[in-house]
């Protein structure tokens, strides 16, 4: 597995963490942090798409 | 004698030597951290009701550290991508960013540790508990001889259980003020170091081991950024592979943090 593939796993988990933190924040009456968590999750997804396009030619292996 | 497969992949494994080596190493690391996470689950499940701490760690600092590590993973990848397109200048820039981000992470972690080491729980002779950050110890302070005084910035509670969950409204409303306590009134005084309870023990063990990995990774990345980058001139492909391998390790360390942060800070 190349760094590209491992980075994809990392981005996926980071997205999960962002939305998970947002859920935690909303359940703990911290809506401001919740919004930040959702925004971060969306930014990470956009970054993930950008990174996949940028490294299109590099192998996953 | 030339060592084979430092650049090209071995036909049987499909990997060059260093990549096979790092994945075997990371497999052993998964077992190490996996064991510690299991220990955490068992300690927490086995804790007496109401005696597992909540809200003891600074979520804001933990979040900042999460962002720093996430950014460092991105700069590591970009440094490798720069090597792939033979742009040494960009590689230098992105790897320098990684080093700075890693050092910032360690700086914040050190601050968090320091905060725990100056935070004391003091069992008083009247059965109450004083809790807060150490401000001052008088010159003649000696707990064994029962002489002198200690001053903390904190509050006093009736029951030790009140110190366990700092997320409650009562805990948030607690007024912290300077309290001077005579050594003669102290039954036991202990800071929030690893010896304090099972939570601090597993917290310091896991986050400390993780911080050591960050430190080790930073040293390797610094070497590859500095003196080790000479290889770029003689064997750029092999150097690029080294950057990939260090990046794989760095990503693993970041992944550990992605699990460590919610487990330690948010639950």
Image (cartoon, helix red, strand yellow):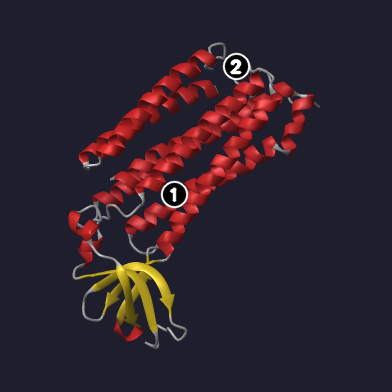
Secondary structure under badge 2?
Answer: loop
How many numbered circles are shown? 2
Would residue A48 be found to the left or right of residue B7 on screen? left
Quadrant of residue B241 within the rendered picture: top right
Q: Which residue is mark 1?
A: B207
Residue B258 percent coordinates (x, y)? 40, 37
Image quadrant where one finds the C terminus of chain B: top left
The chain under label 2 reads B
Instruction: Work out whether residue B144 or residue A36 is closer to the camera in this orientation and state it.
Output: A36
Residue displayed at 26% across by 39% down? A25
Alpha-carbon neighbours of circle 2 within 10 Å: few (<14), some, or many (≥20)? few
Cα–Cα span, label 1 and label 2: 38 Å
Q: Give the numbered dot on residue B12.
A: 2
Residue in the foreground of this view, choosing between A31 and A28: A31
Tell whether B261 sits left or right of B103.
left
Q: Residue at left 23%, top 37%? A: A26
Looking at marks 1 and 2 on the same chain, the residue that comes earlier in the sequence is marked by: 2
Of B169 and B118, the residue lying toward us:
B169
Give how far across and how far down residue B151 sits, in percent: 37, 76
Foreground: disc 1 or disc 2: 1
Is residue A40 in sight in this rendering?
Answer: yes
Residue shown at 35%/52% (left/top)?
Answer: B57
**In this rendering, would B11 be left or right of B132?**
right
Instruction: Tell me which chain the residue with mark 1 is part of.
Output: B
Within 10 angstroms of label 1, few (less than 14), some, or many (20 or more) residues?
some
Compared with residue B115, is residue B251 higher up or lower down, i.e. above or below?
Answer: above
Q: Label 1's element?
A: helix
**What numbered label is drawn on residue B98?**
none
As displayed, is residue B131 above or below residue B211?
below
Q: Is residue B33 visible?
A: no
Where is the N terminus of chain B found, in terms of image quarters?
top right
B259 relative to B84, above or below:
below
């Amino acid at each position: 597995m190349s760094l590209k593939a491992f980075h994809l796993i990392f981005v996926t988990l980071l997205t999960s963490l962002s939305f998970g933190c947002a859920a935690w924040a909303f359940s703990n009456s911290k809506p401001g942090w919740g919004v930040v968590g959702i925004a971060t999750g969306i930014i990470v997804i956009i970054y993930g798409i950008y990174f996949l396009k940028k490294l299109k030619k590099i192998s996953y292996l | 004698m030339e060592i084979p497969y430092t650049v090209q992949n071995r036909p049987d494994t499909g990997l060059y030597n260093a990549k096979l080596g790092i994945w075997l190493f990371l497999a052993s690391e998964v077992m190490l951290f996996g064991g510690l996470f299991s220990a955490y689950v068992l300690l927490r499940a086995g804790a007496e009701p109401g005696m597992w701490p909540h809200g003891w760690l600074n979520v804001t600092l933990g979040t900042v550290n999460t962002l720093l590590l996430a950014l460092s993973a991105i700069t590591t990848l970009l440094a490798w991508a720069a090597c792939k397109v033979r742009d040494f200048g960009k590689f230098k820039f992105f790897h320098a960013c990684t080093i700075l981000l890693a050092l910032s992470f360690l700086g914040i972690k050190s601050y968090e540790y320091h905060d725990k080491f100056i935070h004391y729980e003091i069992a008083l002779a009247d059965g109450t508990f004083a809790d807060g950050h150490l401000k001052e110890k008088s010159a003649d302070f000696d707990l064994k001889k029962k002489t002198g005084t200690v001053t903390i910035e904190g509050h006093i509670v009736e029951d030790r259980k009140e110190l366990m969950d700092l997320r409650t409204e009562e805990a948030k409303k607690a007024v912290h003020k300077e309290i001077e306590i005579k050594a003669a009134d102290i039954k036991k005084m202990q800071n929030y170091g690893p010896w304090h309870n099972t939570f601090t023990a597993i917290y310091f063990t896991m986050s400390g081991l993780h911080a050591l990995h960050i430190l080790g990774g930073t040293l390797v990345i610094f070497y590859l950024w500095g003196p080790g980058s000479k290889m770029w001139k003689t064997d750029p492909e092999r150097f690029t592979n080294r950057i990939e391998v260090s990046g794989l390790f760095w990503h693993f360390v970041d992944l550990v943090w992605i699990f460590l942060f919610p487990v330690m800070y948010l639950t």
